Structures are given as C-alpha cells and as structure tokens.
Image (cartoon, grey):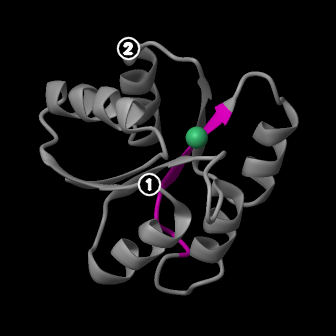
Amino acid sequence: MKVLLTDDSSTMRKIQKRVLASMGIEDVLEASNGKEALDLIGQHKFDFVLLDVNMPEMNGMETLKAIRSNPDTVKLPVIMCTSVADKGQVMEAIKAGATNYLVKPFQPADLQKKIEATFGK
Ligand SMILES: [Mg+2]
C-alpha cells in the first residue's frame, strides 16, 4: 500500500508515519501543503491520502476539491484531518467528497481505526 501524508506539521506527519509503520505500511510519501500533495498525486499512484485541513499555500479543502474534480483521482480515498474546534469542517469535508475524516487531536489508535474502517478491515 502506498500512502501520501499531507500536513504542515512535521511532528504530525511523524506520528502518522509511525502508526502506518505499525500497520505494516512503509511506502509513504509526505507533503507539507496542498500544492506539494497535488504534485505528488500527479506523479504516483497512492492507495489513500491523509489530508490536513489547515495548511499554508493551499489548504486541505481546496486540495480535496482539486482531487475530486480530476477524473484520474475522483475515486482516490482521502481521509481528512479536521479540527475539533471547527465542527463545520467535518460537514464541509464530507460535502467536498472526503472518504472519511479524523478529528484532531487524536490518539494513534484512532488513526489506525479510521484507516481500517475506510478499507473495511
Ligand atoms: Mg495544519
């Protein structure tokens, strides 16, 4: 499985990477904003993308909309990382086509459960 982690916090990416490694997923690329993410999505075939909402340059909502409006990636699974402080983000993410969402702050086990739920394990 090949996964793209998109978050402007390198600490958050490190945490996510560790969770994926614990699940046996080692083929992981990282982006720190939406522009970088879209570049990598154009160059690689990912099984799913973890996408933070609040990022500089290009935020997660804009990135998700770009992913969904491209026929090549319209079905690419995207798990959005939304902020607990902004409940409207969850609704907006679902409306924009998020496959699933994870509310921050989360425990490593929560991320694993969300990934398993997304892939029906
Ligand atoms: Mg962020």
Quadrant, the C terminus? top left
In the image, residue 14 lies in the stretch drawn in magenta: no
The numbered mark at residue 4 is none
Q: Quadrant of residue 109?
A: top left
Q: Is residue 121 visible?
A: no
Look at mark 2 in the image and give the residue it sits on: 109
Residue 69 located left or right of residue 3: right
Mark 2 lies on a secondary structure that is: helix
Q: Residues within 10 Å of mark 2 (few under 14, many from 20)?
A: few
Residue at coordinates 63% horizontally, 65% vertically from top-left?
Answer: 58
Position of residue 42 measured from the top left corner of the image (x, y, whole percent): 38, 82
> Residue 76: percent from the left, percent from the top?
46, 66
Contact between labelled residues 2 and 1, with CB atoms less than 8 Å apart? no
The reply, left or right, for residue 103 in relation to residue 5 is: right
Q: Which residue is mark 1?
A: 32
Which range of residues does the magenta coloring cover? 74-82
Q: Magenta stretch containing residue 79, yes or no?
A: yes
| Residue under the point 57% across and 73% down | 67
* Residue 60: percent from left, percent from top: 63, 55
**Residue beneath the point at 43% across and 69% down:** 36
Q: Tell me which amino acid carries mark 1.
A: Ser
- N-terminal-most mark, 1 or 2: 1
How much space separates mark 1 and mark 2, taking CA atoms? Answer: 23 Å
Amino acid at the residue labelled 2: Ala
